Amino acid sequence: KQEVTQIPAALSVPEGENLVLNCSFTDSAIYNLQWFRQDPGKGLTSLLLIQSSQREQTSGRLNASLDKSSGRSTLYIAASQPGDSATYLCAVSLEGFQKLVFGTGTRLLVSP
Amino acid sequence: EPEVTQTPSHQVTQMGQEVILRCVPISNHLYFYWYRQILGQKVEFLVSFYNNEISEKSEIFDDQFSVERPDGSNFTLKIRSTKLEDSAMYFCASSELWGRNTIYFGEGSWLTVV
């Protein structure tokens, strides 16, 4: 059974810092991995999608990497801003299945 | 940018009542999903729907639940005889295809069963 874990569970940083969020998964037979942002009481906003054949994806200040063999992904946020404060979720889709398996999330607070 | 819309945003219902949650997926998408998130817990997959039938479902999605695409735009989740433990945020999602495409989520419907 696929388990997805995210470390740290919570992170508090001052504005301007670069930071790394970690995601690990137990079954490397994934189809892709997706990073989401969730604001309190809100839906999930897709940030980046990495196919299993890719090593990384970039969008603006965000960069996500994938090491499928070791079961890890990282989300790098450059020059963090207070508006980045949210919970960040990673989710993997498994080969042969349509569902996403979500991680536990990292709650990020960026203070001015 | 196209988005997935859900109604209602919040519903309170008495235990044992039936609830229908509605969703309008993105118009050119072919795959539709329901997920739920119990307060403080992970987002969990319930069901996926393609070509007018369920293509995959989780252990959570038992006979109490059903999904339907009654017309060309709406996608509904029906929960029969609600229980207290059904209280959760229910997210509808859609994707153009499966696997290679981003899955887009709606804002969610918060269901409270009392």
Image (cartoon, grey):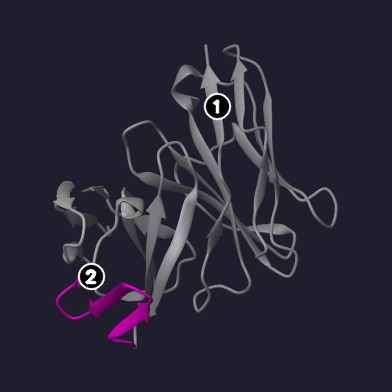
Q: Secondary structure at mark 1?
A: strand
The residue that appears at 40% across and 49% down in the rendered structure is A38
Kind of residue at disc 1 = Leu
Tell me: residue A41, above or below residue A83: above
The residue that appears at 20% across and 62% down in the rendered structure is A16
The residue that appears at 65% across and 54% down in the rendered structure is B4
Q: Residue B51's x, y, as percent?
A: 73, 65
Asked whether A66 falls inside the magenta stretch, the response is yes
Kind of residue at disc 2 = Tyr
Q: Read off the chain for label 2.
A: A
Q: Give the tally of numbered discs.
A: 2
Along the line of sight, the residue nearer the viewer: A74 or B29:
A74
Along the line of sight, the residue nearer the viewer: B45 or B56:
B45
Q: Main secondary structure of the magenta part?
A: strand
Write down the residue under mark 1: B111
**Stretch in magenta:** A54-73
Along the line of sight, the residue nearer the viewer: B31 or A61:
A61
Tell me: residue A106, above or below residue B26: above
Residue farthest along the right direction in this orientation: B71
What mark, if any, has residue A22 been given in the picture? Answer: none
What mark, if any, has residue A76 been given in the picture? Answer: 2
The answer to whether marks 1 and 2 sit on the same chain is no
Q: Secondary structure at mark 2?
A: strand
Residue farthest along the front direction in this orientation: A112
> Along the horizontal axis of the image, is B5 left or right of A32?
right
> Along the horizontal axis of the image, is B94 left or right of A103?
right
Quadrant where the N terminus of chain B lies? bottom right
Q: Residue B67's x, y, as percent?
A: 68, 45
